[in-house]
Image (cartoon, rainbow, N blue to C red):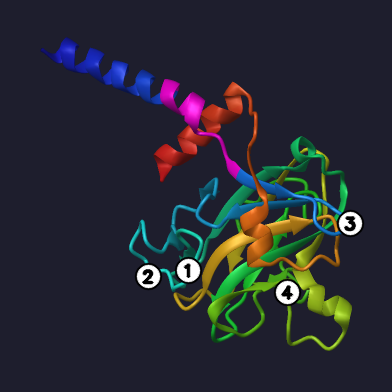
Amino acid sequence: MLRFVTLAGYIFFLSFILINLVWSVPKFKVSNYGSGTQIWFEAEDFDDRSESKNYRLGKKEKAIKPLDGSFGDIITNQGIKGWIMYRFDISQIGGEAGKWRLSYRQVNPNNHSDWLWVLGDDGDQIPIVPPVFIRPDHIIGEVTVPHPFKWIRIGDGTAVDEKDKDAATVNTLKSGENVMMLWTRQGSLEVQYDVFCWSSDLKYEATDEDYKKAKDHQFAIDRKTKLTVIWAKLRR
């Protein structure tokens, strides 16, 4: 009986892997608005997060009900220290290494900001403990955004200098896979992140209509990467 249960368990696990090798592919949208390339992904489609699970899904994990107007689920923060991670490869969408701007669609009624960390621009290794963050260089969400959801393309809305207002939104991305992480600064359930957009046209201003019209895209990733994605999902 024990052997049967063990065999059944192995069969289930192998079936799970085979299914995910086909379907567990990161989902993105791609566009070429303005004079550049954009890659869009929804906040709930993250790759990994800290064990504290401080960043949580609004609807699926019952952290808070997504406000009207969201594109699917949202992520919010329970006010606990930790991080959430997103991986994306601009080389597979025709993007090139260089300066890119992050825009983010959110509701943030009381100006509760986060730290943003980008692999390469902010360090050569993904941190497992909070790195040293500097204001305004690493801030996003330092801006008041009452409902409804709005696209924000600056990091520190309280800064006087225009460059300082950019804060963490302008980064140098690599030609291959890139990694961005949000780290808790002023975590709050009042903040709802909905969609992220990276654009090689630094002057581009994201809109809901542009997001809707952007083309769906799924990356071709190797088996090792797929297994990493599966393992990350199992850990959730």
Q: What residue appears at the point 46 percent right and 58 percent down from the top-left corner?
A: 72
Magenta stretch: give its range: 18-27
Q: Earlier in the sequence, mark 4 or mark 3?
A: 3
Which residue carries the number 4 mark?
155
> Mark 4, mark 3: which one is toward the viewer?
3
Name the secondary structure under disc 2.
loop
Which residue carries the number 2 mark?
64
Q: What residue appears at the point 50 percent right and 55 percent down from the top-left corner?
A: 44
Residue 26 counted in the magenta span: yes
Secondary structure mostly seen in the magenta stretch: helix
> Mark 1, mark 2: which one is toward the viewer?
2
Q: Earlier in the sequence, mark 1 or mark 3?
A: 3
Q: Amino acid at mark 2?
A: Ile
- For label 3, the crowd category at 10 Å Cα-Cα, with few meaning under 14, some 14 to 19 and many 20 or more, is few
Q: Amino acid at mark 4?
A: Gly
Q: CA distance from mark 1 to mark 3?
A: 34 Å
Which residue carries the number 1 mark?
77
Q: Amino acid at mark 3?
A: Ser
Q: Position of residue 8 (x, y in %)?
A: 23, 16
The quadrant where residue 156 appears: bottom right
Check the picture and name the quadrant holding the N terminus. Answer: top left
Q: Earlier in the sequence, mark 1 or mark 4?
A: 1
Q: Which mark is residue 35?
A: 3
